[in-house]
Image (cartoon, rainbow, N blue to C red):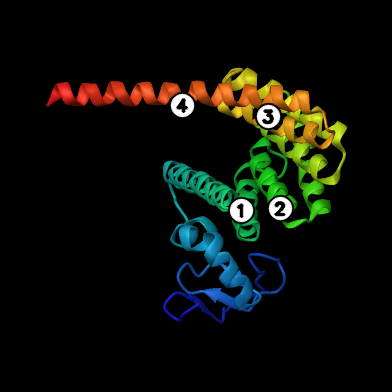
Amino acid sequence: MSAAVNPLSNPKGGKKLCELCHKPAYLQCTKCRVTYYCDTAHQEADWLSIHNRVCQMLRPVRTPAPFHTLQADRDHHRAEIRKAQEKLISMSEEEARRWLFEGRCQEALPAARFCLRIAMETHGPNAVQLVPAYLLLAEANVGLGSLSLAEEYLSQAEWTVLKTPDCSGALRQQLHRNMGSLHNTTGNLDAALQHYANHVYYASEEYGLDSIITCGGYFLMASVFQKQNKIDIVKSLHKKVTDSWHGHLSKLMEKRMKFSVHQTLSE
């Protein structure tokens, strides 16, 4: 990284821990001045993945709260910090998903770890709001072949969901999709099918039977039946996926045409 982009210098003060590995840190971000690294490799990885997006937002979140005499001022400050934390969670989750969508699992890891850390600071170590970060970390580690780590993150996510009876169907379907992918990768096809079926169940409850999210579960199930050489089932599921996408795209085209007609008539 060039000097213009590399915001590091030697930190002053007490012992600091690396943002990525939590080992003793010797480098400090000179822009936010509240983030530290053990070496330039970790700094550069974090900068690329997420820190360049959140750097300027971290100072108020990671510095001690100023003393306020009035309770109203203290409440206002806490509310502002909470708002900033929620925005950081959203931004880091979005960045991690973007990296995963591009197939760049290594780059997704720092963003996903940051998302988990901020979610813990905001909601506590056992909150259901941590589950999306666990799932991102699991997906990245599956992509990197670190299956034991992926299993640990998925176990944390599953345990958290089990302790949360009112957990949303949207979150449950994500959990089962990720667990199915792990079992599919390790060759436990029966377990993969079970989790993919649960993914379809919760997705259909949340989004409808013909939604593209639900049909994604059909496609994943078809990949397992393909491995089992059950071609008739594969064809049936692929037809379901095709029909769902055809309906979805037809609706989009219809809306686009209506909008175009409306724009023409308005001119």
Residue mark closest to the camera, 4 vs 3: 4
Q: Which residue is mark 3?
A: 217
- Residue 163 shows up from this direction: no
Q: Residues within 10 Å of mark 1 (few under 14, many from 20)?
A: few
Relative height, residue 34 to residue 264 (above, below): below
Number of numbered discs overlaid on the protein picture: 4
- Kind of residue sitting beneath label 2: Gly
Looking at this view, is 95 or 103 the one in front? Answer: 103
Q: Which residue is mark 1?
A: 103
**In the image, residue 248 lies at what x, y percent?**
49, 24
- Kind of residue sitting beneath label 4: Leu
> Is the C-beta separation of discs 1 and 2 under 8 Å?
yes
**In the image, residue 126 lies at what x, y percent?**
72, 40
| 112 sits to left or right of 77 | right
Q: CA distance from mark 1 to mark 4?
A: 25 Å
Q: Which residue is mark 2?
A: 143
Give the residue at x 53% y 59%. 50
Q: Residues within 10 Å of mark 3 (few under 14, many from 20)?
A: many
- Kind of residue sitting beneath label 1: Gly
**In the image, residue 17 lies at what x, y percent?**
67, 69
Q: Residues within 10 Å of mark 4 (few under 14, many from 20)?
A: few
Q: Which residue is mark 4?
A: 249
- Residue 124 shows up from this direction: yes
Looking at this view, is 150 or 54 the one in front? Answer: 150
Give the residue at x 68% y 38%. 127
